[in-house]
Amino acid sequence: MLSIAASELIQIIRNRLVLVTSLIMPLAVCAFFVGQHETFAAIGSLGYIAAVMMFTVAAFGLYATAVTTLASRRQNLFLKRLRSTAEGDPVILAGLLLPVVVLAVVQVTAILTALAVVAGKPAEVALLVVATLTTLAMMIGLALATAGLTNSPEHAQVTTLPVTLGVIAVATWVGIAGTEDLTWFKRLLPGGAATELTMNAWNGGSP
């Protein structure tokens, strides 16, 4: 698994488009939110900022990159070659996805730490960790599902768009409007419950 992961990490570094999509663009957006945290906190809250930044990284850095990676490896028959080895399918998938998962964890940790430094630490750190891991797990599941419908890396730019924009839109809506109204509807939307959990973890409140 580690050899597959190391090879995949090299491919990510060499691919400029993936590098921009998974690293530079999410970090640039998050840096803007951190820099303007007072403005966005007035619109929603610090928990809202944390949730939107987390989903920006999870959507672009993890979800879209994972779908593109799996589609690319299937198109160039790399997956087929891996399946002819002694490694099982779970190990192969874990090896292919490990680099993007680790990069996403590092990015989320960095941006939330930066927000805590400039705006104050979260009320419940342990709950925030749970919210982060839950969000990343959800996005991995969505990536695996979307990859099954994606024929090529180019096609991934289309198939990932609804989920990418959708989860960020849900995080924004729930982050600003809260869950007092339409509570269960918002919680059942992809990212709704995770956004609420993140806000409760940062702002303090009942999870």
Image (cartoon, helix red, strand yellow):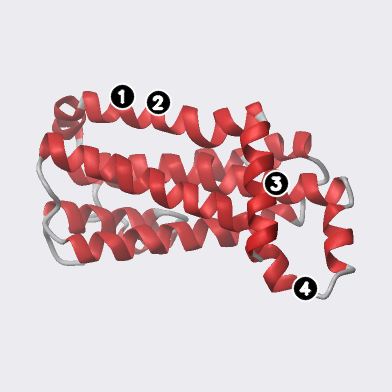
Query: Is tag 4's residue or tag 3's residue first in the polypeptide sequence?
Result: 3
Q: Nearer the viewer, residue 137 or 189?
A: 137
Task: Say if mark 1 contacts mark 4, CB within 8 Å.
Answer: no
| Badge 3 element | helix
Q: Residue 67: image x %, image y %?
A: 67, 48
Crowd band around label 3 with a 10 angstrom C-alpha radius: few (<14), some (14–19), many (20+): many
Task: Check whether the beta carbons of the residues at disc 4 and disc 2 lie within 8 A of each other.
Answer: no
Q: CA distance from mark 3 to mark 2?
A: 22 Å
Tell me the crowding category of disc 4: few under 14, some 14 to 19, or many 20 or more residues within 10 angstroms, Cα based.
few
Instruction: Say which label, 1 or 3, has the lower sequence index.
Output: 1
Q: Along the horizontal axis of the image, is 96 left or right of 126?
A: right
Q: Is residue 120 left or right of residue 47?
A: left
Question: Amino acid under label 2?
Answer: Ala
Q: Which residue is mark 1?
A: 32
Inspect this view and state whether residue 31 appears.
Answer: yes
- Give the amino acid at mark 1: Phe
Amino acid carrying label 4: it is Glu
Quadrant (top left, top right, bottom left, bottom right) of the N terminus:
bottom right
Name the element at disc 4. Answer: loop
